[in-house]
Amino acid sequence: MAHLAKLKGVFNSSFLWMDGKSSVPNNDDFYCFRAQMEQLGAMEPLLKNLWQWWETCASPKLSKVQALALRRTSLGSAEVLPDTLSRYQTLWDFDSNIPFLDCTGCSCPNHTLFGTIHTADGMALANARISFTDQPLSVLAQSNHQGQFTIRGICADSGANISATLERFAQGTASIISNSSRTSRVEIVLQRLGKIKWWGVSAFHPSCFSRYHNGTLLDRKVKKYDSSLVLHDLKPHQAGSYHCKASNDHGSIKSAVAQLTVIDPDVPSCVSQPEEYLIRLPDECSQEGTGSPFYNVGHCSNTRCAGHLADALQCQDASEHCCGTRRMEVREIPCAGYVLPIKVVTECGCTSCTQPKILVRGKASAVDDGEPLRFGEIYLGAEKIGFTGYKGTFTIEVPPDTPRLVVKFVDRMKKFVDTVKVFPFDQRGGAIYQDVRLMRRKKPVDLEAMETNVIPLGEVDGEGPIGEVIIPPRSFFRSNGQAYNGTVKASVTFVDPRDMATVTAASSDLNFINAEGDLFPLRTYGMFSMDFWEDESHQGLETGKVEVKMDAELIKMPEHLQKMKLWSLNPVTGLWEEESSFRLVKENRRKREERAFLIGNLEIRERRLFNLDVPENRRCFVKVRAYINEKFNPSEQMEGIVITLINLEPRPGYPSNPQAWGRFDSVVTGPNGACLPAFCDGQRADAYTAYVTATMGGEELEAVQSSPKLNPHEVGVSQPYLNKLGYQRSDHADSALKKTAFKINLAKPNPNNIDETNGPIYPYRSLKDCEEAPVMANHFRFYRVEVDKYEYNVVPFKESDLTTWTGDYLSWWPNPQEFRACYIKVKINGPQEYMVRSRNMGGTHPRTLGQLYGLRDTRSVRDLEVYNSSAACVEFKCSGMLFDQELVDRTLVSIIPQGSCRRTAINNYLREYLGRHPPVVENNDTSAFSMLGPVDPLGHNYGIYTVTDQNPRLAKEIAIGRCFDGTSDGFSREMRSNKGIALTFTCQEKPVGRKSFFQRLLESPSQTLTEIRSEMRDNEQLRGSSRVVPYPSRLRTMFATPTRRSPSRRRRVDAAQA
């Protein structure tokens, strides 16, 4: 054993010396050992390798003097070794380190390394190349279908790192772990490149960073940056946008754009002078002097600003500061018969930013029959965040600083295909409503694993399949890599773009990251989802390489034949990742018939959605705006509207046939409309067409009509460009169709034609021009179809921008994080529709008592099933805490129909509730109704509809839908005037040409008195058992003061409280 230890010491010292960690080793023992072995005549191959390694690896590192000294070493100093080689083998047993002849390490012939390769979720990966981390070109082994590999000769104590590489996966590395003296193991986890690239530069392992300022590459030598960029002594010219581009051998990725604002220390970061903000006054009011129906109430920019730092050494505020309202003052506007108070912003300042919640609400249901996804799982990226409700409804709170919202819906009952959606949302806060449609999973069929199976893709009536999936024999494997040869259950669901109804059920937004790191669009020819499982155990199965074949005749654009690729959807990022390219193959199907096919290969390792797509670079932007009504006033644009553009591809020679959709995009409108990306063509105007819709909270907005006469002024696009675009509303050929969409040709604008340089279509490089286009520039329009209504707040607030909220006792919405909408349903018996006003004043709070909160005017809507009956859903200010959250104010609400109307009924439940919650407002005037608004959220049985949401407009839309339906959980856009009523008024109109009462009384007294008796009987019948004392109204102004209670009444209330 002493001899063995001595020899080991020689080699260990040699290794250290070669690494520069020790002095030259004593080589006498090595040469003596070699001489003794030669004298025994049995120089073991092991020692030959040792000696060859020494001469090859160690000797070149010696100087000439050192080498000469080694050759002159004495052999007599060596000790006698054991007599037999077997004794030597017993001592060393061939398991110690044997140096490799290439000088890179050691080998242990009797030692075995067992390894496994799999993904993070445990899926085995086949055909992965195994190598030492520092020798990636020297492949040691490949993994099998079970993701396993075996290597002999690698020593457990070598400390080596093993790497695995596989196409479309990032390289994985792990260290060897010893199990025993003869075996060791290693486990390597691989991640797809797409997932790593999207989720951060740190996991992307970049080899190069590039920094850009306003799109221009910064000089690395001048700025001296690498993974971080530091700017010193900032100047105004350094302001603008900055982004980073990280690159390595696998590609590139770009960071989000950061905006840098440089402010001169002598210039305030928040301008104190408010910006102009016009609101419309009630019809009976106008500005003094000018007579204008609009009034400038001012508003602050809400831009970021620098707060006041406590210490001069600090460089960042403890909380974000924005330019907001610092001071307001009350002004009075003369109106017909009353004075209207209004609060105006007079000074802006740097205050704490309002941080409203960002929500996405909606409903998930089947695309064919609307069956809801009940209790489906919801994933935000890779994290499960909740479930859908019984009716398929869901609410998602968007995390802060989320650039891209990717949500996956999973049906645990396996009725629907897993669906991934990329939701647009408003970064400023509030809620967006999304109607999610799901494809129903196809019924499973039986496949034999030992046979070739062909599955068609596409089932449009009267059309052939787009392609087919060919699965060779013995292609199915269990998750652990074990081959499966039994009966396979297969469900293949295809989203066919030739069927327009499937566009709403398509997953993701058809984008991928190209080699330059940019988000790039795809044009789809179909998506398919494939699920395979065992017949008996229902365990999921994977497949080896399968063949996907497409019919080349169905591809109408010749250039797409060369660009067609097979993609798979990453469910975490919502981006498509390339699986393989297609090759063009010609086959003889019958005699003298040759057909062309595109053939690609695919391995189904995990449950993913696959896509037949073509990258497309002919892109433009389409400008769209939404308005409150069809007057299209620039100051009455709507924000938070979801505009969706569906790209269509025409079929040559068959313009009347249904068109195939190619992609879709959705954008939320802001204060200056929305710019939607779309494919376009500069050579042929109708090469691409688009189908555009607009929705708000599930309600569809109307587009401008195109027939019987096309009006360029209403459409918003001037001639002759409008004719080139071929604008048509969806009911252009059939008036029975819906009016909620329009179709246009996507003709790329000609820069040499002045008529095409002002919108509504902009080149892809001109996104900024599109986003900043003035309202007078060409654009397409949607408008909301609704009854006439008017809203006035004493404290102005823009419901589409929650950051404009101001904390004030007279604010209509006292809490910017929670908006409660209240409506009362008023029935009108009369021959026409009437305007109904709600006047809302402070009722019980000492700071707001007798002061106006706001006005609401709403026109009643005719009930199509009830003769001479209409109803109005009138908003009133909810009772509750004011913005200081200290005292409750019960709002004094007055409901006043605008016409010759008389109150004939009050809901019994509402009357009883108000009586049990004093004080009770006297209602002596039968032409109106007043109450102190209920604090409790009453329901349809009372004729009161209350909804709370983080977005005021969505809360109002839901409440109006319930009010129309007359239920507490339903929704309707058709008025039902006999359900859920709170108040009933009867209105009469004087016939045209009818004389006044006094004229008729003088001319025919008896007939006039008979008419009066008849009218009184009719009113009594409508009024029923209720009795109203006809006291004359003592109100001389528009705003009533609270009725003074009698002392006896006050004593009774005090006694009850005691």
Image (cartoon, grey):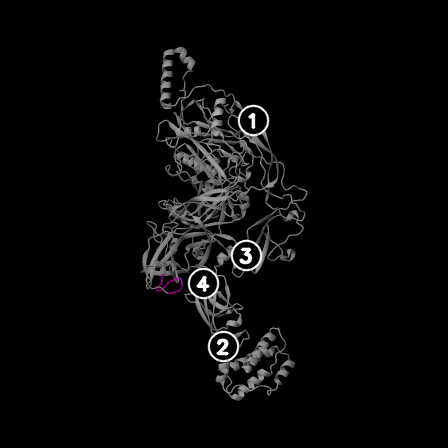
Q: Is residue 859 above or below residue 11?
A: above
Is the residue marked by circle 2 packed among few (<14), some (14-19), or many (20+) residues within 10 Å? some
Residue 767 lies, in percent from the top left, at: 53, 46
Amino acid marked by disc 2: Asp
Amino acid marked by disc 4: His
The mark nearer the N terminus, 2 or 1, is 2
Q: Secondary structure at mark 3?
A: helix
Instruction: Judge depth for marks 1 and 4 and give the one in front.
Output: 4
Q: Is residue 257 above or below residue 38?
A: above
Mark 2–mark 3 CB contact (< 8 Å): no
> Does the magenta stretch mainly form a helix, a strand or a loop?
loop
Q: Is residue 69 above or below residue 633?
A: below
Residue stretch in magenta: 471-482
Q: Is residue 339 left or right of residue 871?
A: right
Is the residue marked by circle 3 packed among few (<14), some (14-19), or many (20+) residues within 10 Å? many
Q: Is residue 125 magenta?
A: no
